[in-house]
Image (cartoon, helix red, strand yellow):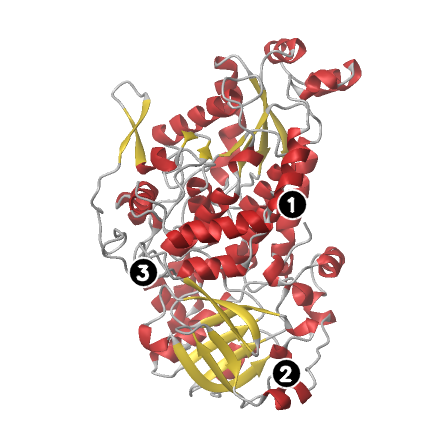
Amino acid sequence: MNTLHPVVAEVTERLRERSRETRAAYLQRIDSIDRRGPQREHLSCGNLAHGFAACGSTDKEALRSGRRGNIAIITAYNDMLSAHQPYERYPALIRQIARDAGFTAQVAGGVPAMCDGVTQGQPGMQLSLFSRDLIAMATAVSLSHDMFDGALYLGICDKIVPGLLIGALSFGHLPGAFVPSGPMPSGIPNEEKSKVRQAWADGKASKAELLEVEAASYHAPGTCTFYGTANSNQMLMEIMGLHLPGASFTAPDTPLRDALTADVVRRVNALSALGEHFLPIGHIIDERAIINGVIGLHATGGSTNHLLHLVAIAHAAGIQLRWDDFDALSGVIPLLARVYPNGYADVNQFHEAGGMAFLIDQLLRAGLLHGDVSTIFGSGMDGYAQVPYLDDSGALHWKPVDKQSGNRGVLRGTDEPFRADGGLRMLQGNLGRAVIKVSSVPDDRLVIEAPAIVFQDQDEVPAAFKRGELNRDFVAVVRFQGPQANGMPELHKLTPTLALLQDRGHRIALLTDGRMSGASGRVPAAIHVTPEAVAGGNIAKIRNGDMIRLDAVNGRLDVLMEAHELDARLPHTADLSAQHSGMGRELFGLFRQAAATADLGAGVL
């Protein structure tokens, strides 16, 4: 490992100094909890009897003795989510692993787990971002019984991992680890799916043809294989030290996957107050781990959703992460991976090319990653530059990753990156602040200057296309899509239409106070605009025909007019009642009242 890059060191030190008081208060809170033994020793006899009443005799005796660890299982299992379906058998597997090793495990609770793929473009998507905070609260409720010495978090997809981690950090005195289940096998090539989607948007493919390619892409148990928020979550959990090395993208329901699960169960028990290496999760997630997460996002072109989630995760650990920190790092962290929608490959091909181990090894060698961190695997990130394997007897081991990429079209070293800078950039100007994902945007589209066409809802864009109104250069301004307006739903319905228009040669961009997540692709998109329209942000002042300049090279986002003219304009207002009059509208009302701006993590915690 080389000397830490000065910009990485500077950003980390700035974050540490900014967070000094809040981080100290957080650590004081979690360290003040009595760690001389299990918390259940402080329960009354009636409390404890309730806690083990349903257990078998062996587990009951272990819990009565108080001298063996008891691990909480927080599960996001349901069998509608392909990524979470493999978790059905995990509680029984984990309990047996624990018994065989002389301790116990209990399902402490379940958390909701909605699929953004199912709710995309539907009323249920209004609850998506809200669900993160609900998951965090459900996690905390599950751990509130004080029966546990550590926890295993079973979750993968979009808001689920951030919610679980926020909840885990509220019980930061407990050790914990995340247990993935792995990606589904590769389906049809992503480019083939994308072509049919665009043909559907152009009226040249039938619904039956579209459904056929979608079903051939999303076709089996396991995580969707494109590099969206779900797989960005897995990258983050590994690069932040909460997965075992190589666990993120190992296939579901395989001997290696089960061996990794067995190992992490035993490790969490060893990290408990009753084990040999006590290490609470609140100490693993420190300023260095958070910065490592930001670096991982840049190096892989990860999901823009984590401009919201990492801020909220850091806040839960007393760390004051800001968009400025992402921006400062974006200029020095090279883009080392191209995974769809930022390239042709999927996460299985990324994993086969060397995956997380190769990525981490390269970043460490270049001094672009904090190596001196604590992880569930031990001290230092160097252990994560290894790949897991089973020997002839079925025993789990790790070996150093190959120093050469297995596929340079998917994964490269720091000496030949796909881009010299990261996949995410910040924009600011007289329209506020925004983020753009540039990892798959062509170089000749990094600067777009075109007239605005204003929309109040994403459904208006394909409707305007079908009326023949969009065959020209323009910036689609889709506003009133922020967290306080309608829950900040993802706007993927826009992608096929805008990509089709760009392929026709038009200079197209998107400007929105909503979000596109990890699936944003080749069309330049300034998203997460803050202040949002409903809060009177200048995006609400844009009119049809206003010239918009999106400049990802210089980090600018402006409407081209004199300051006094923009100041004099009144913001447009909108009746939002229809936008959240569907499923869960009463719950959404609670979220809208508490929602912060996107810059603050767009959540209530």
Residue 387 visible in the picture:
yes
Residue type at mark 1: give it: Thr
Q: Which structural element holds mark 1?
A: helix
Residue 80 image position (x, y, % from top left)? 53, 45
Q: Residue at x 65, y 45 (%)?
A: 22
Where is the N terminus found, in terms of image quarters?
top left
- Label 1: how many Cα within 10 Å (few below 14, some 14–19, many 20+): some
Measure the C-alpha gap from mark 3 to mark 1: 40 Å
Q: Which residue is mark 3?
A: 343
**Position of 316 compared to 507: left or right?**
right
Which mark identifies residue 22? Answer: 1
Q: Is residue 550 above or below residue 272?
A: below
Instruction: Kindly identify the residue that appears in the image at 60 percent across and 29 percent down.
Output: 174
* Residue 541 numbered mark, or none: 2
Q: Position of residue 13 (x, y in %)?
A: 50, 49
Find residue 379 and report its horizontal and vertical position in percent: 42, 30
Of residues 43 and 500, the one drawn nearer to the viewer in this rendering: 43
Choose top left, top right, bottom left or bottom right for residue 300. bottom left
Residue at mark 1 to residue at mark 2: CA–CA distance? 37 Å
Q: Is residue 589 above or below residue 466?
A: above
Say if residue 216 shows up in the picture.
Answer: no
Q: CA distance from mark 3 to mark 2?
A: 36 Å
Pointer 3 or 1: first along the chain: 1
Callout in the foreground (3, 1) = 1
Compare residues 4 and 242 and report the one nearer the observer.
Answer: 4
